[in-house]
């Protein structure tokens, strides 16, 4: 079954709160939206990175935005 859809869409203002890797912004009609995800090793790394060291209670390394403790 085939459909032919003619649309005229006028948008004066569009505000998008956030866009993430899995976001889809659709305006109008779409027959199929297929997901695509690519992972590239652009640095040419061959092994995992070293473990990060804990920063402890040093105030120099505290986040600017206070974070809630994990639950």
Image (cartoon, rainbow, N blue to C red):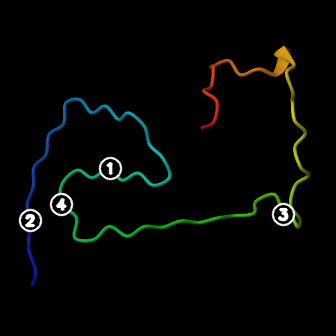
Marks 1/3: CA distance?
Answer: 33 Å
Label 3 crowd (10 A; few <14 / some 14-19 / many >=20): few
Label 4 crowd (10 A; few <14 / some 14-19 / many >=20): few
Marks 4/3: CA distance?
Answer: 40 Å
Residue 19, relative to residue 44: is it above or below? above
Dot 4 and dot 2 residues touching (CB under 8 Å): yes
Q: Residue at x 89, y 49 (%)?
A: 51
Comparing marks 1 and 2, which lies closer to the viewer? 1
Query: Please, what secondary structure does the residue beneath circle 1 have?
Result: loop
Residue situated in front as seen by the camera: 45 or 12: 45
Q: Quadrant of the C terminus?
A: top right
Give whichever of discs 1 and 2 has the lower sequence position.
2
The residue labelled by disc 2 is 5
In the rendering, which numbered label is found on residue 29?
Answer: 4
Marks 1/2: CA distance?
Answer: 19 Å
Image quarter of residue 65: top right
Residue 62, relative to residue 23: is it above or below? above
Label 2 crowd (10 A; few <14 / some 14-19 / many >=20): few
Give whichever of discs 1 and 3 has the lower sequence position.
1
Give whichever of discs 4 and 3 has the lower sequence position.
4
The residue labelled by disc 3 is 44
The residue labelled by disc 1 is 25
Query: Please, what secondary structure does the residue beneath circle 2 have?
Result: loop
């Amino acid at each position: 079954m085939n459909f032919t859809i003619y649309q005229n869409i006028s948008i004066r203002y569009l505000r998008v709160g956030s866009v993430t890797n899995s976001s889809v912004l659709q305006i109008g009609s779409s027959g199929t939206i297929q997901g695509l995800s690519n992972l590239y090793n652009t640095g040419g790394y061959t092994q995992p990175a070293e473990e990060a060291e804990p920063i402890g209670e040093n105030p120099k390394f505290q986040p600017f935005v206070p974070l809630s403790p994990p639950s």
